[in-house]
Amino acid sequence: EQLKKLKIKNVDMSGFSYGIWFFVMGLSKKVLIADKVGPIANRLFEGVGPFQFGESWAGVLAYTTQLYFDFSGYSDMAIGLGLMLGFKFPINFLSPYKSRSISEFWGRWHITFSHFLRDYLYIPLSGNKRGILKTIRNLVIVMFLGGLWHGAQFNFILWGLYHGLLLSINHIFRNLNKVSLPAPFLTLITFIFVMFGWVIFRAPSLSIMKAIFKGMVGLTGVENLFGFGITSRTFGQLPNFVDIFGGPNKIGFLIIGLCIIFLAKNTHEIKPSMNGKWATIIGLLFVASLSCLGQDTPFIYFQF
């Protein structure tokens, strides 16, 4: 899919400079955001449970953020290197967490993979041309195979089936798009369902998956609802809640990451002019990224 869309052009200074921008942005996403919030996610998914409400949501939010910045950062770096060498790779992410439905999410997340599933599996299976039941069958089969592509482990298969179910529900109730619902509400609901999916994707066992879901819906007890000991008698122990996030610095990186996800433009939508201001910004990001390269933290998607 990448090779089919690959465009070759002569290298010029403008393209080379734009490639540097893409590469530095991708490196910054990986090193300055993904790697910084990763320990919060690891603390949850490598734990044993039961998990409190606060630590469950903190860990899942962190993994949701980590996965996006890790994978989109990798894609941006590849695009940047390509531009510097005269190649043009297709954009692979279009702010997927801003999606208002699951079908829109799959039009924005890992776009080349989504197009592969659509063009080589969904359409040959007849797509949505033969009635609602066969459409649902096709969606479930395609997403099952999409999960299996990531590996034969139970969690990838369940993740694929989960998204097949969500896409089927989305298709059944597609006429609800005519109902005027606030866009932020639709985005929030979609984001939550995507996060639930990432729990399935990452959880090392069914027991851990169940424990995290129980924590997220508050089934670990009212007194532990927020993870920092709020009861009818006290509002104390805020430091414990901060510790859930791995300390104030980790909270800061997670907040910055979420703000970028929902408020910032995509990398390709920013057109830096190669003047002193932009050169300084790119240089500072590059130096900051290099200063954080001490640990061996490979890209998550390298395992696939």
Image (spheres, grey):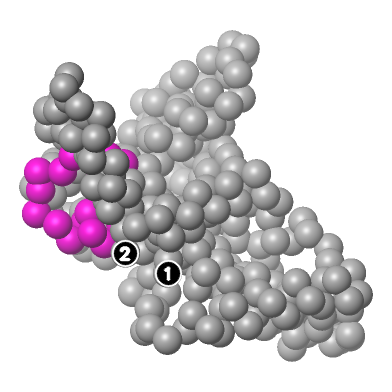
Which span is picked out in magenta? 40-57
Circle 2 crowding by C-alpha within 10 Å: few under 14, some 14–19, many from 20:
some
Circle 1 crowding by C-alpha within 10 Å: few under 14, some 14–19, many from 20:
many
Q: Nearer the viewer, residue 32 or 123?
A: 32
Residue 284 seen: yes
Where does label 2 land, which residue? 39
Residue 24 seen: no
In which quadrant of the rendered view does residue 192 lie?
top left
Instruction: Identify the residue shown where x is 84% and y is 67%.
Output: 272
Q: Amino acid at mark 1?
A: Asp
Q: In screen coordinates, is 44 left or right of 273?
A: left
Which quarter of the image is occupied by the N terminus? bottom right
Q: Amino acid at mark 2?
A: Pro
Against 297, residue 96 (above or below) is: above
Q: Secondary structure at mark 1?
A: helix
Where does label 1 land, which residue? 35
Instruction: Identify the residue shown where x is 79% and y is 76%.
Output: 280
Asked whether the beta carbons under mark 2 and mark 1 sit within 8 Å of each other, the answer is no
Q: Position of residue 152 (x, y in %)?
A: 21, 63
Residue at mark 2 to residue at mark 1: CA–CA distance: 8 Å
Q: Secondary structure at mark 2?
A: helix
* Residue 45 in magenta stretch: yes
Which quarter of the image is occupied by the C terminus? bottom left
Q: In screen coordinates, is 224 left or right of 258?
A: left
Q: How many marks?
A: 2
Against 47, residue 173 (above or below) is: above
